[in-house]
Image: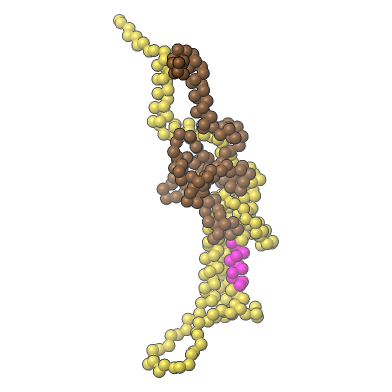
Chain colours: A yellow, B brown
Amino acid sequence: MSEVYVRVPKRAVPIGAAVITVALLAGIPASRDFVVERVSAAVDPFPVADAGTLASQRVAAEQAIGRAYAKGADQLRQVRELRLPISDEEANKIQAKAIEDLKAVRRGALLAVAEAYAMRPEEAGAYAPRVEQELDAAAVPADGVLLAPRLYTIVLRASDLSKQVADGATVAMTAPKATPSPSPTPAASPSPTRTPAASPTPTPSPAR
Amino acid sequence: MTAWEALRGRPWLLRWVALPMLAGAILAANVDLSAPPLLGSERLSAVFLVDGQGYVGHLEDVAWSDVLTVRDVHYFQDARNSTTNLPLALVKRGAEVHAPADGLRIRRERVLAVERVGPGSPAARAIRTQRGLDAPRSQP
């Protein structure tokens, strides 16, 4: 029985090892990503915020959500100071519904913050009413904080929805009442006198 | 006698002096001595382009490449419609329709300025908070 020997030059060993390593790393994307990620993290770390920063960002997001609610409620209050084409009873009803919707938007946004902070459901259930009480109890500070992108998305959504609610209620309160359209009649001869405009422009009412 | 002839005549000079000097020169051209690797805190950079757009992230700037690569990219967005009381907001790149996943490569000639982002700056805090929210956590 004859034995076959393969003679491998000593210098070829490290070159071969390097070629095999590169082929493996380049050929298997998962392993390449793993190695690149680990090396990058070692060379240039990606630190996470400490508990204090996380808490301050959460409070800033809560305040921005509180401002969205306050802005919508302020808009409704200003509209109620106008002389409206609808009765007080109707205006009260629309305003109450809008405030209810604004509170629902605020509650939803606070629950989204709780979810972002990975609170358990029972914690989130207690968290949202507590923050709402705090926001209602005192004026929200005007200082802005650059929020983390995820928190900003929540605030932006709350701002948009609150604006939609307030604008919808404003239109409902200020739109002219639907009156029966006059039946078509023969056009009268042109009158030289000017008639007052019929559009009911809201004017401030000192009574309210 | 030229330098090449001198090196040919003395192989040890090439191996122990010339090659290490070359390696050192390449390394020096690509290592930021103000923030050396494996030391210090995170190195976030802000890259501002000539069109006014700005990106914040981890910058890879290799001397011989005509592109800069930014990873973990964030950019600024108009926030005047929101109630954050700030004109700008920070947005994490990656949620676009094409879902960019492997960093942002910018041609060098489009870059107006590159600045280091302070570790205590609002942008750095917001980015670290985002990472904290992305990481699995059990307590707020």
Residue ranking furthest to the right = A138
Q: Is residue B46 magenta?
A: no
Q: Give coordinates of residue B101: x percent, y percent.
A: 45, 42
- Answer yes or no: is residue A108 visible: no
User: Where is residue A180 drawn, in percent x and y?
Assistant: 45, 85
Instruction: Judge from the rendering whether residue A3 lies leftward or rightward of residue B5; answer left or right.
Output: left
Relative to B81, is B24 above or below?
above
Outermost residue, top side:
A1
Going 62% across and 46% down the picture, which residue do you hit? Answer: B121
Indicate the position of residue B133 as horizontal and vertical percent values. Answer: 56, 46
Q: Main secondary structure of the magenta part?
A: helix
Look at the image and give the residue range highlighted in magenta: A68-78
Locate residue A127: give its quadrant.
bottom right
Indicate left or right for B101 with A134 as reference: left
Identify which residue, B35 or A50, lies in the foreground. B35
Indicate whether residue A69 is drawn in magenta: yes
The quarter of the displayed image where residue A86 is located: bottom right
Q: Residue at x 48, y 31 (%)?
A: A35
Query: Does residue B85 appear left or right of residue B67 in this picture?
Result: right
Residue A13 makes an appearance in the image? yes
Given the current orientation, which residue lies at the most extreme front position?
B1
Which of B112/A122 is in front?
B112
Looking at the picture, does residue A166 appear above or below residue A178?
above
| Residue under the point 55% across and 68% down | A166
Q: How many marks?
A: 0
Q: Nearer the viewer, residue B32 or A52?
A: B32
**Outermost residue toward the left?**
A1
Q: Is residue A127 above or below residue B24?
A: below
- Report x, y in % for residue A81: 62, 76
**Is residue A83 placed above or below B31 in the rendered structure?**
below
Q: Quadrant of the N terminus of chain B?
A: top left
Which residue corresponds to the image point at 56% horizontal and 79% vertical from the top-left? A202
